[in-house]
Amino acid sequence: MANIINFEELEWLAELLNKYPRESLRKIAQAEGIEYYKLKRIYDKYYGKYIFVNAVYSITKLGLKSYVAFISVPKREIFEKGKEMLNNPFFGYINPIFGFKNGIQAILHIPVDQEKYIPELLSKYSDDFEYYEVWSNDPSKVKFGKWEYSYEYAILLDIFKIDARTPIKELEAKLSRKRPTIRFMIERLIKDGVIVGFYAFIDNVEKAHDRSVVGIAKELDIEEIMSKFKEREIKLGILRPEGYYIEWFFSSEEDIGRKILEFGQYVDKIGIAYLDLFRDLNHEHIKTRFSRMVKKDGSGYKSILEF
């Protein structure tokens, strides 16, 4: 019999796991004065099905820079080209997009010493593309790090991106390292600023954001946008050397034409991204991204062109 979802329980558990993302259930119960078996019952009911805890990374500390690319691809080739792109771990994720470019929207994480190869990389998939360096905040204050870890750290980053509550025993088996070493590795990544936090989120509960309006604007009144659309989920990025990237999320059950009219007045270029079509492929892709990006000897990143 399928679980009956109690949203109060879901939100309660998510709040607890945001407060105690890596602690054991017994420690959480003791710290909060909660009956352990009640917590375990609710945890077993929802965790890994509807609630997940992921690590949040600072890619700049790893010497990576974020780009958004728009690549023209004929409709009949979108799935084939999408799978080709996801063979390359330097693609963060991809979505089909239709609008100012018909084809694929991609987020890339590129080593800072390989930026010059981006046009050659994208030309593997199309002769028609455009790309932008994108930041979540002011890039002028950022200092890039570099990969200076053993290969096992790449495996750990992949694991924590999927499930930051993976038990130590399971980590020991996957990393071939003992508990004290693994604890040291986690603490080092936190101390170095690579792991900036942990985030508990609810997923797989309802069909909500499976579409987005993607816009590029030379100028944007951020305060007006955030105030006017405060009830909506919005992703905002700063483009370098100038401009803004903005994404409004919505459901396919809503009127797409209305969304274009509603948001199109704020941007110079606009498209509709289909977030559900590559969802499973993207999910599988991120499970091994870092371990495919990093050389087995831990000496640095592979070439973005070798895939």
Image (spheres, rainbow, N blue to C red):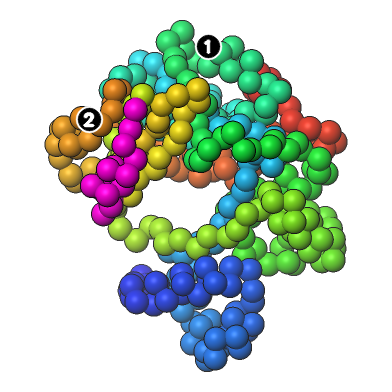
Q: Residue 181 falls in which quadrant of the image?
A: bottom right
Picture coordinates of residue 55, whole percent (x, y):
60, 55
Q: Residue at x 63, y 68 (%)?
A: 22
Question: Can residue 165 be seen by looking at this rendering?
Answer: yes
Left-right relation of 272 to 257: right
Which range is magenta? Answer: 219-232
Left-right relation of 70 to 291: left
Using the image, tell me which numbered label, if any, was put on residue 264: 2
Whichever of labels 1 and 2 marks the residue nearer the N terminus, that label is: 1
Q: Which residue is mark 1?
A: 123
Three-letter amino acid code of the residue under disc 1: Ser
Examine the rendered structure and indicate whether residue 162 appears above or below residue 278.
below
Left-right relation of 13 to 108: left
Callout 1 secondary element: loop
Quadrant of the snapshot with the N terminus: bottom left
Three-letter amino acid code of the residue under disc 2: Gly
Picture coordinates of residue 266, whole percent (x, y):
25, 31
Marks 1 & 2, CB-CB < 8 Å contact: no
Using the image, tell me which numbered label, if any, was put on residue 285: none
Q: Residue 100 falls in which quadrant of the image?
A: top left
Q: Residue at x 52, y 89 (%)?
A: 34
